[in-house]
Amino acid sequence: MNDRLVLVSDLHLGGGTEAAAAGPWFADPFDQDEAFVQFLTHLRDREEGHPYRLVLLGDTLDFLRVPVIGPRTGLYARDDAEAIGQLDRIHTAHRTVFRGLADTLASGARVDVVAGNHDVELARPAVRDRLRALLSNHGCPPAALTSLRFHPWGYHVPGLLYAEHGNHYHDINTFDRPLHPFRREGLLERPPAARLGGLHRLASGPAARPWIRDAMADLLPRRHLGSAARASYRGRLPAYADELGLTADVAGRLHDLGGTSVLGIARRLLRARFAGGPTFPEQLPQVAALVHEALSSSGQAASFYVFGHIHLAQQVRLPATRACYLNTGTWSTDGEEPAWASPRRPGAARRTWVEIDPGAGGLPTATLLRWAGVPVELPGPIDSAGELEEMGHDGIGRTDAAC
């Protein structure tokens, strides 16, 4: 694979002013339409005649910020039609971005869309089909649409990159079955953070009344997956691993790293709040090291491990390895002060991304950049994960496969 990889995450395209009118918890966190389209144009101009891949690494769309309005009013889509309605409202609010993505595909670039916890609705084939149709309406030729691919969990380029959104390892945002995140037909699973978000909406006063039914339904005890359902899901992993270019054992180990429990969540939050324990953004480099260990166990180690989700651009050398962990950061307003920000760590810059050059004939390199009308390379490589504490958990810069 000789294509340059451009990884961007956490745009959080919401429903614009129409959705925001439903209450403060539906405010659209994306206000960078023109800047993002300029960024896409820069990529096309720079890479003209050279293939590249744009990897949208989760939470590109923010279905959680778009209420269901129509025959039924609710917090979340309960079927394909309601989810398509949410997507259409996101498109209406951000036509410029959709047009820019259509132009990117039409130029010959490949676009890979990885699902995150805010756009898990992409697990619905009908939603993916509607997204293709919207891009087609913006002039993307049918042949170019074949270069738009969806990934339910991870993204892997053997020997070079392993990437995913990162919520799988975050106890309050993980799904029991990321390859099939449905509780029953048509109804997607909601992680603890999304369910608590429904309660926050109820706290906003009388305007929250339309959301009471969905919020209360989320509080009902969840039926645990039976042994047959779990065994059936484990049976999906070998085919998924083969598609991704991993062994079935590695896919199983990665799945198990995302295990969670109510007691485990409570313990972690209490340690972080009262005992100075690490927050999830502070833990993510260690998670990357565990993922590296899982891949290495089958001789499939990558040079770079890239995640999003935490809205904080990072670059860390994994101790005692030649591998590096990077985080793409965010383009949303949430990047100014992450919702789970630790008092030990400052807020993050917005409009950041990661580029990986496979280094045909030489060492591959990874670069962390920020869009400021032009690309700006962020300075200061970190020597190892151990230095993360010293540098405030936001070291950023450039590295290579040798780190």
Image: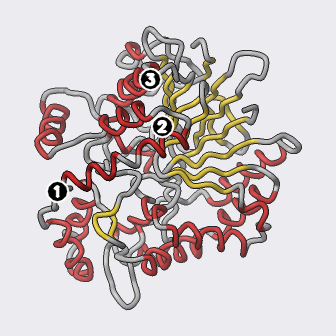
Mark nearer the N terminus (2 vs 1): 1
Q: Nearer the viewer, residue 376 or 76?
A: 76
Q: CA distance from mark 1 to mark 3?
A: 30 Å
Q: For residue 71, which quarter of the picture?
A: bottom left
Q: Nearer the viewer, residue 375 or 290?
A: 290
| Picture residue at 38% right of the left edge, 65% below the top | 64
Q: Secondary structure at mark 2?
A: strand
Graded by Cα atoms within 10 Å as few (under 14), some (14 to 19) or many (20 or more), the crowding at tag 3 reads: many
Q: Which residue is mark 2?
A: 307
Q: For residue 209, which quarter of the picture?
A: bottom left
Q: Is residue 25 left or right of residue 57?
A: left
Q: Secondary structure at mark 3?
A: helix
Q: Is residue 221 left or right of residue 258?
A: left
Q: Position of residue 162 (x, y in %)?
A: 53, 33
Mark nearer the N terminus (1 vs 3): 1
Graded by Cα atoms within 10 Å as few (under 14), some (14 to 19) or many (20 or more), the crowding at tag 2 reads: many
Q: CA distance from mark 2 to mark 3?
A: 13 Å
Residue type highlighted by circle 2: Phe
Q: For residue 222, which quarter of the picture?
A: bottom left
Labelled disc at residue 390: none
| Picture residue at 74% right of the left edge, 36% below the top | 3
Residue extending farthest to the bottom is 71
Q: Nearer the viewer, residue 333 or 132?
A: 132
Depth-wise, is mark 2 or mark 1 nearer the camera? Answer: 1
Residue type highlighted by circle 3: His
Depth-wise, is mark 1 or mark 3 nearer the camera? Answer: 1
Q: Position of residue 4 (x, y in %)?
A: 72, 35
Q: Which residue is mark 1?
A: 224
Mark nearer the N terminus (2 vs 3): 3
Q: Which residue is mark 3?
A: 292
